[in-house]
Image: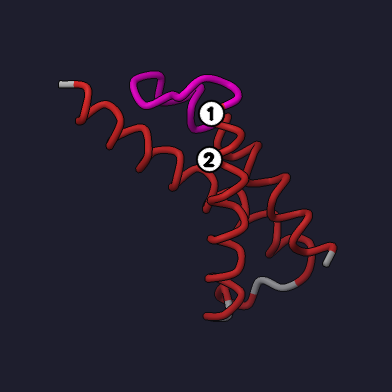
């Protein structure tokens, strides 16, 4: 249970970091956080099912949640930007 909580929190952080770095795809702080939380949960679960390259415990949860949140935020931001044209 604590791994999921860590993944969700690190997903929110990852989404906001990606939004700050890639201003064109940013959804705003709240949008980045929500999408990051979803991405952190999904990414964390997917990477834990595949083994995550040997990352276990808190470090694996932080990495998979953060990366999952950032990736999903960029994907959603790209789709939003493409639909606005």
Left or right relative to 56: residue 52: left
Q: Position of residue 59 (x, y in %)?
A: 73, 60
Q: Which mark is residue 35?
A: 2
Spatial separation of the CA atoms under disc 2 and disc 1: 6 Å
Left or right relative to 47: residue 74: left
Q: Residue at x 62, y 57 (%)?
A: 41
Above/below status of 15 relative to 67: above
Tell me the quadrant of the picture where the C terminus can be found.
Answer: top left
Q: Residue furthest front?
A: 83
Dominant secondary structure, magenta: helix
Give the colour scheme of this rendering: secondary structure
Query: Magenta span has 27?
Result: yes
Label 2: few (<14), some (14–19) or many (≥20) C-alpha neighbours in 10 Å: many
Q: Which secondary structure, mark 1?
A: helix
Q: Which residues are magenta?
A: 17-30
Above/below status of 53 relative to 83: below
Residues tagged 2 and 1 counted as in contact (Cβ below 8 A): yes
Left or right relative to 52: residue 80: left
Label 1: few (<14), some (14–19) or many (≥20) C-alpha neighbours in 10 Å: some
Q: Which secondary structure, mark 2?
A: helix
Identify the residue position indicated by label 1 in the image: 31
Q: Position of residue 7 (x, y in %)?
A: 69, 55
Q: Position of residue 67 (x, y in %)?
A: 53, 51
The quadrant holding residue 81 is: top left
Q: Residue at x 61, y 63 (%)?
A: 44
Q: Residue at x 61, y 33 (%)?
A: 33
Tell me the quadrant of the picture where the N terminus can be found.
Answer: bottom right
């Amino acid at each position: 249970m604590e791994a999921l909580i860590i993944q969700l929190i690190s997903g929110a952080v990852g989404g906001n970091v990606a939004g700050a770095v890639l201003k064109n795809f940013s959804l705003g702080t709240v949008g980045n956080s929500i999408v990051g939380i979803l991405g952190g949960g999904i990414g964390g679960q997917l990477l834990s099912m595949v083994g995550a390259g040997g990352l276990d415990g808190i470090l694996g949860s932080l990495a998979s949640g953060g990366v999952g949140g950032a990736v999903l935020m960029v994907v959603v931001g790209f789709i939003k930007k493409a639909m606005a044209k």
